[in-house]
């Protein structure tokens, strides 16, 4: 019905047959997603963070690395008012007041707000790269295993199973320490040396992506394989095969579009986990190289002075919370949109 | 059942073997070693140290030696060496033999960087702390999560439901790394109800356990709700109501027991999440657990500590998963292992 009403624009008096076609799964899913206010809120927050990350150079009022040691641990008046335990120097306390810093400065006199702004880059990049690797590697592996079955399936899935049983975070931590040897121990000219140079030039982000990417594909491979198994015996696949469609084309054009829904939903729900992995790695000191800012590293530094300067840990924690919250909302919304039966689970 | 168990244990051992080989290979491929310091050690001393800890042997031999020390039980004289108690995890005094014999098992080797200690003693001293924290967090997670999920599941699409699920989505978005500092500030610094850091007193466990357990409670609540709603539509619930059982028994006995099955399945992954959470929480709250040793051992290249802790954590995780699978049978007699 809705489709008919929609196409009934004043200029078109006669409803043509092709305009009454039923809603596709995708269109109705997107419609459901757009009517979910919380998911839209999540999407909006993500979009804002995305803009902040892209235009970090314009938005950040100060440099993220410049240390102004006279202003170390300084805080603006409103932050001091916000946290009753922080007492300004003028009132017999210990906190330097400086309204130059929107959220205050850290123990090296770097602007917290600017560091938060630049920190959005790494969190969002992880949120993008994790799923990208999972989709490219995991979906291909799962497609091949599920479509061909037999020995290929068995071999691939046994390897995946063992990798999967390996505790993810232990693997990432080990990989990180493997990738990131102490400086000066690598011979120049080797591949490892080149990679480390590349990593250093990205502020240590490269290896975080590799570490998270190497572990993110396994779950996706298992999910994809299961989905392929449920789809590959369908008549349209048999029909495609019987008219001689090449295998890669069956996989790409007939199977993949039909299993994409659950895959996208699962991957969106994984994004908060990738973000928290990065925060965790930076927290324990295996993440970005200082002075590149990461929210996890900022929480780690801030939590050591939480008694005296709670703003240094709480603002990054709050920012991290917002982005996790947004991705969780979006993931929930996508799941409800693609599979209304799963609502709320 | 017996066959299933054997197959699962075989699979578990395979996984642990792969974990140990991968860990060993990765950590030995990394440049740098436990005796490299900023200033550098004279070559002869370094060579001697490496010989002392058998680091100059072929890698395969080193690996087999190390794994052998853990896996193979040994019988030694009771007073063979007092510190043997420190070397081995399991020490059982045997009642026969003149000098007293002891069956000893699981030698994780000496720590390479803190040379007065053995890995076994590090584990024995610090693992109980991490375990206590983890169990306390799990208790927090279950006591908050299950009632919240039941409340939401019994009255879907009401204020109860929205409150419960609101709390749940909040919990999913606040990992320990966020909640730790926030709780610390609000309840320790601002209100002064609990100590900011430290370990040992009962009141010092409250904040870290809550910081760790809250995220768990969110997952548990969401799953409890979904599974309870599904169970409530089953025929046997209608039967139970039709034969006049009180609502308390229908929900408490018939529905909840079945609704808990999916909840139990998540305890395996939860154990994993708790593990990583403890690293963070131990750092934030200054708790002397095993996590700190694991992380510092990696940057110090303390090979034996890395291997010991990785194997410990990995076996903890695979055993947790096995127990979870076995507990299905207890909760649902229909499930058979094949």
Image (cartoon, grey):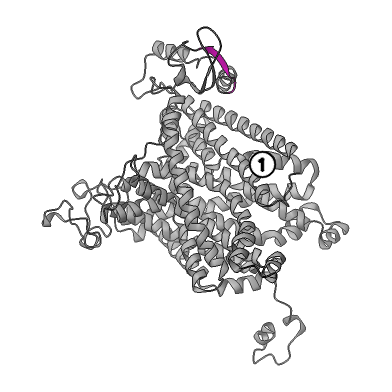
Q: How many marks?
A: 1
In this rendering, position of residue B195 left or right of residue A238: left
x, y percent for residue A102: 27, 60
x, y percent for residue A286: 43, 39
x, y percent for residue A282: 42, 44
Would you place residue A130 above or below residue B293 in this image?
A: below
Quadrant containing the N terminus of chain B is top right
In this rendering, position of residue B6 left or right of residue A126: right
Quadrant containing the C terminus of chain B is top right
Graded by Cα atoms within 10 Å as few (under 14), some (14 to 19) or many (20 or more), the crowding at tag 1 reads: some
In this rendering, position of residue A307 left or right of residue B79: left
Q: Residue at x 44, y 21 (%)?
A: B86
Which of B147 and A107 lies nearest the eye of the viewer? B147
Residue A108 figure quarter: top left
Q: Residue at x 75, y 37 (%)?
A: B3
Would you place residue A175 above or below residue B89 in this image?
A: below
Res A288 visible: no
Residue bearing mark 1: A161
The residue marked by circle 1 belongs to what chain?
A
Res A57 visible: yes
Which of A132 and A142 lies nearest the eye of the viewer? A142
Q: Residue at x 80, y 43 (%)?
A: A150
What secondary structure is found at the residue carrying circle 1? helix
Which of B310 and B195 lies nearest the eye of the viewer? B195
Which of A248 and B223 lies nearest the eye of the viewer? B223
Q: Residue at x 56, y 57 (%)?
A: A269
Would you place residue B77 above or below residue A166 in this image?
A: above
Write down the region rendered in magenta. Answer: B71-77
Query: Is residue A68 within the magenta segment?
Result: no
x, y percent for residue B303: 48, 25
């Amino acid at each position: 019905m809705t489709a008919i009403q929609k196409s009934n624009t004043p200029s078109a008096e006669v409803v043509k047959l092709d305009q009454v076609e039923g809603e596709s799964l995708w269109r109705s899913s997107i419609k459901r997603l757009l009517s979910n206010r919380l998911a839209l809120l999540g999407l909006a927050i993500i979009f804002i963070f995305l803009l902040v990350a892209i235009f970090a150079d314009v938005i950040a009022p100060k440099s993220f690395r410049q240390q102004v040691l006279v202003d170390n641990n300084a805080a603006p008046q409103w932050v001091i008012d916000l946290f009753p335990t922080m007492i300004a120097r003028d009132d017999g306390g210990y906190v330097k007041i400086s309204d130059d810093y929107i959220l205050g400065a850290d123990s090296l006199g770097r602007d917290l707000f600017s560091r938060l702004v630049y920190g959005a880059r790494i969190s969002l990049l992880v949120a993008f790269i994790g799923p990208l690797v999972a989709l490219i590697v995991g979906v291909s592996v799962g497609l091949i295993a599920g479509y061909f079955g037999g020995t290929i399936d068995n071999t691939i899935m046994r390897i995946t199973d063992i990798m999967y049983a390996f505790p993810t975070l232990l693997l990432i931590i080990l990989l990180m320490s493997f990738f990131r040897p102490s400086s000066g121990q690598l011979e120049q000219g080797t591949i490892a040396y080149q990679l480390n140079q590349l990593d250093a030039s990205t502020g240590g982000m490269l290896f975080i992506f590799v570490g998270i990417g190497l572990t993110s594909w396994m779950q996706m491979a298992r999910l994809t394989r299961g989905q392929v198994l449920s789809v590959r015996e369908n008549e349209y696949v048999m029909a495609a095969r019987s008219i001689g469609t090449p295998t890669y084309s069956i996989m790409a054009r007939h199977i993949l579009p039909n299993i994409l829904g659950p895959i996208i939903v699962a991957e969106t729900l994984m994004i908060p986990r990738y973000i928290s992995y990065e925060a965790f790695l930076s927290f324990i000191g295996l993440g970005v190289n200082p002075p590149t800012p990461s929210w996890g590293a900022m929480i780690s530094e801030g939590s050591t002075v939480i008694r005296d300067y709670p703003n240094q840990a709480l603002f990054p924690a709050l920012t991290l919370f917002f982005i996790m919250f947004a991705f969780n909302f979006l993931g929930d919304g996508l799941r409800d949109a693609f599979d209304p039966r799963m609502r709320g689970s | 059942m017996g066959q299933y168990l054997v197959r699962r244990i075989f699979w578990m051992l395979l996984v642990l073997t792969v974990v140990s080989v991968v860990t060993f290979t990765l950590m030995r491929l990394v440049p740098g070693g436990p005796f490299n310091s900023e200033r550098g050690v004279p070559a002869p001393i370094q060579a001697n140290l490496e010989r002392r800890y058998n680091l100059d042997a072929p890698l395969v031999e080193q690996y087999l030696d190390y794994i052998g020390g853990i896996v193979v039980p040994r019988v030694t004289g009771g007073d063979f060496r007092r510190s043997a108690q420190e070397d081995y995890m399991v020490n059982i005094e045997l009642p026969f033999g003149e000098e007293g014999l002891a069956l000893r098992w699981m030698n994780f080797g000496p720590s390479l960087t803190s040379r007065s200690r053995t890995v076994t003693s590090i584990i024995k001293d610090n693992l109980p702390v991490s375990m206590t924290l983890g169990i306390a967090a799990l208790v927090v997670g279950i006591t908050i999560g299950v009632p919240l999920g039941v409340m939401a599941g019994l009255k879907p699409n009401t204020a109860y439901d929205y409150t419960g699920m609101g709390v749940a989505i909040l919990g999913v978005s606040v990992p320990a790394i966020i909640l730790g500092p926030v709780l610390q500030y609000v309840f320790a610094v601002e209100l002064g109800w609990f100590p900011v850091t430290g370990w040992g007193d009962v009141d010092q466990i409250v904040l870290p356990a809550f910081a760790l357990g809250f995220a768990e409670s969110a997952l548990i609540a969401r799953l409890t709700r979904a599974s309870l709603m599904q169970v409530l539509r089953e025929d046997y619930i209608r039967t139970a109501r039709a034969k006049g059982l009180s609502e308390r028994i229908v929900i408490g006995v018939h529905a909840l027991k079945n609704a808990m099955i999916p909840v139990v399945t998540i305890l395996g992954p939860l154990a994993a999440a708790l593990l990583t959470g403890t690293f963070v929480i131990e750092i934030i709250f200054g708790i002397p657990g095993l996590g700190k040793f694991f992380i510092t051992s990696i940057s110090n290249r303390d090979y034996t500590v890395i291997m010991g802790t990785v194997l410990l954590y990995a076996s903890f995780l695979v055993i947790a998963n096995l127990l979870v699978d076995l507990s299905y049978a207890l909760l649902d007699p229909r499930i058979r292992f094949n």
